[in-house]
Amino acid sequence: MARSRLPFQLILEQTVDAGGKVYFQPPATLNMVFPCIRYTPERIDGDNADNRTYLTHKGYNVIYISRDPDSPVPERLRMLPMSRFVRYYSHENLHHWVFTIYY
């Protein structure tokens, strides 16, 4: 049985700095406030036995966006269980750290 997304949302809210926001699948028309975490579902993996899935792992694409290139938040995200740093990029003076995190 898969876990609810809401406890994962709370973990992300505790990880971002005070005043930072966490957005789940924000629409393109939303003006996000920075720093923030934006996350979307990316994949679902499962463990199988007897031709049935008995354990499901949801993977999320998690992007931390900040104007501060030295923010400690990416390191906090990297330290979460089942977290993998994917890449970094900068766009329009905003720094983006991309992770895949299973929950």
Image (cartoon, rainbow, N blue to C red):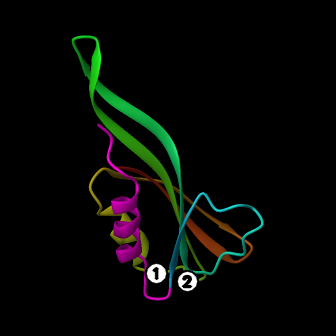
Residue 41 position within the rendered picture, expressed as x and y whole percent measured from the top left: 51, 47
User: Pointer 1: residues within 10 angstroms few (<14), some, or many (20+)?
Assistant: some
Residue 94 position within the rendered picture, expressed as x and y whole percent measured from the top left: 65, 75
Q: Amino acid at mark 1?
A: Ser
Residue with the most extreme right position:
29
Q: Residue at x 42, y 44 (%)?
A: 59
Does residue 55 lie above or below 53 as drawn? below
Q: Residue at x 36, y 51 (%)?
A: 4
> What are the residue bounds of the magenta stretch?
1-19
Identify the secondary structure beneath mark 1.
loop
Q: Residue at x 60, y 57 (%)?
A: 25
Number of the label disc, if any, that sits on residue 83? none
Q: CA distance from mark 1 to mark 2?
A: 6 Å
Q: In the rendered view of the protein, which quadrant contains the N terminus? A: top left
Give the labeled residue for mark 1: 71
Q: Amino acid at mark 2?
A: Asp
Give the labeled residue for mark 2: 68
Q: Nearer the viewer, residue 80 or 75?
A: 80
Q: Within the image, what quadrant is residue 23 found in?
A: bottom right
CB atoms at circles 1 and 2 under 8 Å apart? yes
Residue 46 position within the rendered picture, expressed as x and y whole percent measured from the top left: 33, 29
